[in-house]
Amino acid sequence: MSAQPENLFGSSANDADSQETREWIDALSAVIAAEGRERGHFLLEQLLEQARQEGIDMPFSATTGYVNTIEPDDEERCPGNLEIEERLRAYMRWNAMAMVVKANRLHPEDGGDLGGHISSFASLATMFGAGFNHFWHGESENHGGDCLYIQGHSSPGIYARAYLEGRLSDEQMLSFRQEVDGKGLSSYPHPKLMPGFWQFPTVSMGLGPLMAIYQARFLKYLHARGIANTENRKVWVFCGDGEMDEVESLGAIGMAAREKLDNLVFVVNCNLQRLDGPVRGNGKIIQELEGEFRGAGWNVIKLIWGSYWDPLLARDKEGILRKIMMDTLDGDYQAMKANDGAFVRKHFFGQHPKALEMVSKMSDEDIWRLNRGGHDPQKVYAAYHRAVNHKGQPTVLLIKTVKGFGMGKAGEAKNIAHQAKKLTDEDIKAFRDRFNIPIPDEKLAEIPFYKPEEHTPEMRYLHERRKALGGYLPKRRTKADEQLHVPPLETFKAVLEPTAEGREISTTQAYVRVLTTLLRDKELGPRAVPILVDEARTFGMEGLFRQIGIYNPEGQKYTPQDRDQVSYYKEDVAGQILQEGINEAGGMASWIAAATSYSTNNRIMIPFYIYYSMFGLQRVGDLAWAAGDMQARGFLLGGTSGRTTLNGEGLQHEDGHSQVLASTIPNCLSYDPSFAHEVGVIMHNGLKRMVEKQDNVFYYLTLLNENYPMPGLIPGTEEQIVKGMYMCKPGAKLTPRVQLLGSGSILRESIAAQELLEKEWGVAADVWSCPSFNELARDGQDAERWNLLHPTEPARVPFVAQQLEKNVGPVVASTDYIKAFAEQIRPFIPKGRTYKVLGTDGFGRSDFRSKLREHFEINRHYIVVAALKALSEEGSVPVAKVAEAIKKYGIKTDKVNPLYA
């Protein structure tokens, strides 16, 4: 155990007059005793202010003593039947344990190791019980329902409750982590796998806290804009103390305080252990978190000690016990709970003779019974009650527990607790005895689930509490009740028609025109949620500031510097834009809240989050994957995309792979449009699918900052654009012939190459715009799978092959993305046809676009060379023509491969 100092109030060397010190302390104690703690707090604040005025440097301390924030006399008493609740918790503990252990005893021939966690729920059971029994509202006529971000590793306990409620069957419980046949329960909270049950995916640690903060803000946003009444709803977030080391966990707590999110409650389960060992073995995680949250502006409630400590603390007039509590390290606290009462007597109370005297009449069993606050249902209720009634700030509850509570030798407070999933028969018997589960010895080997008869007091109480709170949780809505209508494609004619003579626009401007048109629609306009990360002017969207305003719950108290301009910076209580600052993770979390509003709020919202494409999916890939799990619906827009298009920004800004990253998310439909009309068609298709049909997909479009004339929509190509490929410019009637494929800005290089091939080399080239190589690849893979599994049926032909089969010649694809992007469709090119792919593999760099496209070997000259080389391989032109073209265009054959340059 760590050595402790003896003097409670500082050494004599630091205290020039200890008697005066004692007089001040006694005076404060007398004021508190006579007039209350609020008066004492007021006097201290006045003294501190006077000290500052007198020039005394008083550093701020954001921490308080290592005791409960709420005094016993101030606790709101729990109105429930705590005896029944304890029995119900015991049954849930048993069933959660049985589920995990049984799953890991099945199919030994398969390794018998499905994993699962017992210890996390074991430490959380009391906290969950208080919430489910007294605080957490289901969706009802008078309440929109609370949002629960459940700590992922505790999922077995949530299943155990749902089992008692009759929401899950024995068969499902026996199929924990066995999902392939469609009957199993997902390992963690996964809305995709259990769409009617889990609301939010949380096991990718750190994302739950971050997403929850923006979810709470989005509820305030909806209310401020009059779209939904959310004033009584709360967002509850369960995190582990180890999880708070994730930067995302604490990354947005300042925003939560700044926007006064009093609908947000964090519950940090401080069992002092993470996956492998102590969280702060040499420190105190509760004190650390208290300082961080209070310093950020949160209401902090600490619940450290259970009721059995109250008499001891009441007798601690000299503060000896409180000092021992403060000085004992977390690593020591863990060791104490991993041992016994005698160990605690010696190593905890033994730090001071008066502390030992305090417990001299207590047995070792009595000392062992001294409980932590998170396992005291009355104190948990009081802490929750204080949290939900606090106004003007978000609240964090720092609640101390024991990891693996009740597991005994199998893992209670041991470093191995997180990994414990295979208990011995002896461990199971000890678990049964500790929680008094009515299962006889002869049945223990079966580890049966336990569920009381429906007429028993426990079961009646269980159902009555949920009925009083509006229904069972967790529960997820899969579709919104409302039906919204998308205007016809012609509504977006501003981007469908050719640009006027001499006019040039970018696809980013096309997107802004689509959005502006949508905002004018009376039905859909209010549901659009433009989300920005401090780049509105980059994307030409500053005109929206004045038009629809930037959401700020306090409005605009200052006069903006550009007030005399048309597009001045306008913040408004009911503003429609969510301006997240320089904060891609926050922007994505806001987008997720809006993109899942159909489920959490029964309101269809249409979020549009635009960002530098390089700072999008690469930076927030974990959040994008979570969005897929949550069945998000909305538009992600990667602006200034392409490795050679954002020409001056360099390596960290130039995106050559976000489309490849997007392809990894199954329900993300991704496009790299070249022309304004493609943007309009794709976005209209997205609105039809996500708003009218309520399909569980979301769209990613990469947009350009390069201006050029737009050719307009070719009637009849709309479906082909959505599928990913259409002929945008047929070639001349010449032979030989090649097929040129492109997307984004590089399609225009293919068009330029078409002209060079025809005029300088006598080769015809058909040019195909391929807005989505990703969708083409998925279509081809789907056709291949069908053909594999249906060998006697007529073979399906991939869409790529359908488009190319009547158009002869080798195929050359060139994009502003790495070669893997266009390589995906190689298997679906018609048999016997040569396929060449050009791409931008390697790091980006700054220069003019023409120089960058030459460097990465994707410009018109390289496309011509690739086409001629493909023709030479098929015997249609002499190979000497390829060498001639290389010389003609000054191509350096000995330069370093751009991948390694």
Image: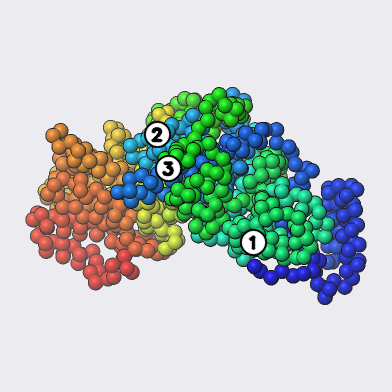
Q: Which quadrant would the C terminus be assigned to in this image?
A: bottom left
Q: Residues within 10 Å of mark 2 (few under 14, many from 20)?
A: few
* Residues at circles 2 and 3 in contact by the CB criterion of under 8 Å: no
Q: Closer to the observer: label 3 or label 1?
A: 3
Q: Which mark is residue 445?
A: 3
Most foreground residue, 247 or 749: 247
Estimate the x, y position of residue 30 in percent, counting from the top left: 90, 53
- How far is the residue under mark 3 from the one under mark 1? 33 Å
Q: What residue is disc 2 on?
A: 171
Q: Residue 354: x and y, percent?
A: 79, 63
Is 141 positioned to the left or the right of 861 in the image? Answer: right
Q: Is residue 608 above or below residue 691?
A: below
Does residue 649 lie above or below 223 as drawn? below
Please give the name of the residue rendered at 29% of the width and 38% of the height, measured from the top-left corner. Answer: 723
> Nearest the camera: 71 or 634?
71
Res. 3 mark: none
Mark earlier in primary sequence (1, 2): 2
How are the residues colored?
A: rainbow
Mark 3 closeness class: few <14, some 14–19, many ≥20 residues within 10 Å: few
Give amino acid for label 1: Phe
What kind of element bears circle 1? Answer: helix
Residue 463 appears in view? no
Where disc 3 sits, the SS reads helix
Q: Residue at image x 28%, y 32%?
A: 716
Q: Position of residue 17 (x, y in %)?
A: 89, 70
- Using the numbered discs, state the Cα–Cα distance from disc 2 to disc 3 in whole angstroms: 19 Å
Q: Which residue is mark 1?
A: 343
| Secondary structure under the numbered disc 2 in the rendered image | helix
Of callouts 2 and 3, the N-terminal one: 2
Residue type at tag 3: Ala
Residue beneath the point at 12% across and 58% down: 872
Q: Please, what is the three-letter code of the amino acid marked with disc 2?
A: Glu
